[in-house]
Amino acid sequence: MADTKERIEKIIEEKIRPYMEADGGGLEFVGFDEATGEVRVRLKGACAGCAGAQMTLSMGVEATLKEEIPEVKRVVAV
C-alpha cells in the first residue's frame, strides 16, 4: 500500500484539485505530519484570497481526506 503522503497527494490530484481549478482556484500539498495527522496545504489562485476559503478547507478538502484516509485528523492552510 502506498504511504500516507502518496495517498494524500493522489486524492488531492484526482478528487479535490479539479473542483478547485474549475472555480479559478488551486491547492498545493505542502506536507503531512504523521504524529499529529495534520495535512498542510497552500491555497492558490482565487482560493488564496477568497472569503470562503476556510469553508472550502473544512467542508471540502478536510472532509474528503478524512473520509479516504483515517490517518488524517485535520487540514490547515499555510
Image (spheres, rainbow, N blue to C red):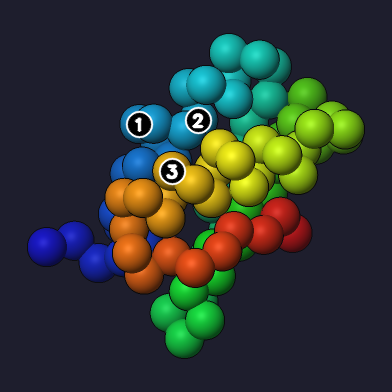
Q: Quadrant of the C terminus?
A: bottom right
Q: Quadrant of the N terminus?
A: bottom left
Q: Is 11 left, or right, of 63 in this rendering? A: left
Q: Amino acid at mark 2?
A: Arg
Residue that appears at 52% across and 21% down: 19
- List x then y, in percent, for residue 45: 75, 28
- List x then y, in percent, for residue 8: 38, 53
For the residues bearing labels 1 and 2, Cβ distance under 8 angstroms: yes
* Mark 1 or 3: the one toward you: 3
Q: Which residue is under mark 2?
A: 17
Residue that appears at 54% across and 43% down: 61
Q: Amino acid at mark 3?
A: Thr
SS of the residue at dot 3? helix
Taking the view exactly as shown, the residue that stands out farthest to the left is 1
- List x then y, in percent, for residue 39: 54, 63
Q: Which residue is under mark 3?
A: 64
Q: Which residue is under mark 1?
A: 14
